[in-house]
Image (tube, rainbow, N blue to C red):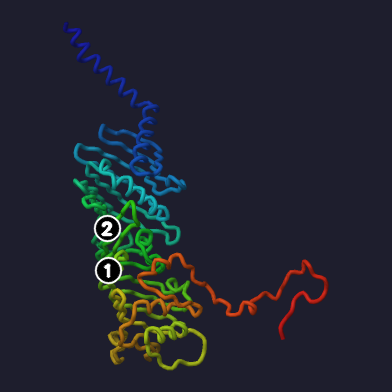
């Protein structure tokens, strides 16, 4: 009896354990486990997953080497992690990333997949998850990208929502205060909403990092443009209608390259600018806009056509300019602006600049110690900005809230249209059926 108990209670469990240990050490088991892990991650994220090697270092810990996430349609690499440690506990999951790298060109599309297939599905966020990374590189072919250090992220599931928060440091920043990013997917309302908040504190965040995710021209401000401040962006996604979004931003945009901003405009304006936003609330769905702040630009050139257009459409007063067609150099542009729905107010504030307090109020632009442009006192229609930037060949369009929906479908002219089509007819004609006489002609 004692022998049977020894065999049943000791020998058999020991042999079973040895068989399991030996089986887990075989390449067959490792490949099977790696394939299952790749399939689960791909199903949850919507991305293709490739793992170099997978090792289960303990019953609760898995180590992945050479992890790659690929776009399922194009096959482009979205992210690469040299080593990943995945620890599963009863009440949480911890993930440690070593030398992760993201590609900004593909991350926007990948984020939509992760958002829709992972964060929007409650069954995939049952346990709190913590992510930690030593150095996170966001590669960008145009600007070289940026590196974030001391990255900590948390995902906290709730009954009808998922919240996430990220803290990180810019490797190029001297600040000791981390950047705070928070995310909340709220499923409690009839239409789920996604709410983003960002607070850079005293860190200057490159605008190229925001351009992939935020609407508007923020990505066309130049490679050195930075944002310092806070913003909130909410997207309400309806499966049967277009997305609704609004944005609220306060802070400053610095190192703006006006060469880049005006590179496709008919008028010329160069210089290095900054925009201080006291408030910036934009809600396209309810057609509401409330933006106010100051614009400061230094050491550039301005085209005569832009000055003439500003005088005609914004009511700016110009001093008599010297004859010529060349651009005019200036020292400073300083202006306060307020855009409230359909109303626009512009006031020159060069007199508040150090060394120019003797200027009268309202000076917008000065050069060589002389005031050249002065703002008007009247309140303008907001669409006057479009008139200022419009080229000479632009056409007048009756615009109202009732017909504004047609604008995306109407193609405006990109060059002057000929008033007399016969005058623009080509003078060089085919000689394929020539039977004598002149082939080309030149007017005298």
Q: Report the residue marked by disc 2.
A: 196
Quadrant where the N terminus lies? top left
Q: Residue furthest top?
A: 1
Q: Quadrant of residue 319?
A: bottom left
Which residue appears at 32% of the width and 56% of the height?
148
Dot 2 crowding, Cα within 10 Å, few <14, some 14–19, many 20+: some
Which residue appears at 43% of the width and 94% of the height?
320
Residue 345: x %, y % from top left: 30, 81
Residue 301: x %, y % from top left: 44, 81
Dot 1 crowding, Cα within 10 Å, few <14, some 14–19, many 20+: some
- Does dot 1 land on a helix, a strand or a loop? strand
- Does dot 2 land on a helix, a strand or a loop? strand
Residue 305: x %, y % from top left: 47, 83
Quadrant where the C terminus lies? bottom right
Q: Observer-nearest residue: 126 or 329? A: 126
Residue 177 to residue 379: above or below: above
| CB within 8 Å, label 2 to label 1 | no
Q: Quadrant of residue 39?
A: top left
Q: Observer-nearest residue: 225 or 126? A: 126
Question: Which numbered tag is attached to residue 66?
Answer: none
Q: Quadrant of residue 382?
A: bottom left
Please indicate whether residue 387 sits to the left or right of residue 276 in the image: right
Residue 377 to residue 290: above or below: below
Residue 60 to residue 352: above or below: above
Asked if residue 432 shows in the view, the reply is yes
Which residue appears at 30% of the width and 22% of the height?
20
Residue 309: x %, y % from top left: 43, 83
Question: Which numbered tag is attached to residue 281?
Answer: 1
Q: Observer-nearest residue: 66 or 184? A: 184
Which residue appears at 33% of the width and 70% of the height?
253
Q: Residue furthest front?
A: 402
């Amino acid at each position: 009896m004692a022998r049977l108990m020894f065999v049943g209670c000791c020998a058999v469990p020991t042999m079973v354990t040895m068989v399991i240990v030996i089986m887990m050490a075989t390449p067959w088991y490792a490949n099977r486990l790696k394939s299952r892990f790749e399939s689960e991650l791909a199903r949850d994220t919507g991305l293709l997953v490739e793992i170099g090697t997978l090792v289960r270092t303990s019953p609760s810990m898995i180590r992945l080497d050479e992890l790659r996430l690929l776009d399922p349609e194009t096959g482009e690499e979205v992210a690469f992690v040299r080593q990943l440690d995945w620890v599963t506990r009863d009440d949480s999951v911890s993930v440690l990333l070593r030398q992760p790298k993201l590609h900004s060109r593909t991350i926007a599309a990948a984020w939509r997949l992760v958002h829709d297939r992972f964060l929007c599905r409650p069954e995939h966020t049952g346990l709190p998850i913590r992510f930690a990374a030593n150095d996170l590189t966001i590669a960008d072919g145009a600007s070289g990208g940026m590196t974030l250090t001391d990255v900590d992220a948390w995902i906290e599931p709730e009954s009808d929502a998922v919240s996430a928060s990220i803290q990180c440091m810019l490797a190029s920043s001297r600040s000791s205060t981390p950047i705070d990013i928070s995310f909340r997917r709220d499923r409690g309302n009839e239409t789920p909403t996604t709410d983003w908040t960002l607070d850079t504190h005293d860190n200057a965040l490159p605008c190229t990092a925001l351009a992939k995710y935020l609407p508007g021209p923020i990505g066309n401000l130049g490679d050195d443009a930075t944002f310092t401040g806070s913003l909130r962006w909410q997207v309400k996604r309806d499966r049967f209608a277009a997305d609704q979004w609004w944005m609220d931003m306060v802070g400053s945009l610095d190192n703006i390259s006006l060469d880049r901003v005006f590179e496709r405009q008919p008028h010329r304006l160069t210089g290095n600018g900054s925009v201080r936003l006291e408030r910036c609330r934009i809600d396209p769905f309810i057609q509401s806009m409330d933006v106010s702040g100051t614009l400061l630009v230094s050491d550039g050139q301005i085209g005569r056509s832009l000055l003439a257009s500003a005088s005609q459409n914004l009511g700016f007063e110009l001093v008599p300019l010297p004859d010529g067609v060349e651009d005019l150099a200036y020292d400073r542009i300083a202006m306060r602006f307020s855009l409230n729905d359909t109303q626009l107010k512009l006031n020159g504030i060069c007199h508040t600049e150090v060394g120019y307090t003797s200027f009268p109020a309202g000076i917008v632009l000065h050069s060589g110690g002389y005031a050249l442009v002065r703002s008007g006192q009247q309140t303008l229609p907001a669409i006057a900005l479009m008139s200022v930037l419009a080229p000479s060949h632009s056409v007048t369009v009756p615009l109202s809230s009732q017909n504004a929906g047609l604008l995306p479908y109407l193609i405006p002219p990109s060059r002057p249209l000929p008033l007399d089509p016969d005058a623009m007819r080509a003078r060089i004609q085919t000689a394929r059926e020539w039977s004598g006489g002149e082939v080309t002609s030149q007017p005298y």
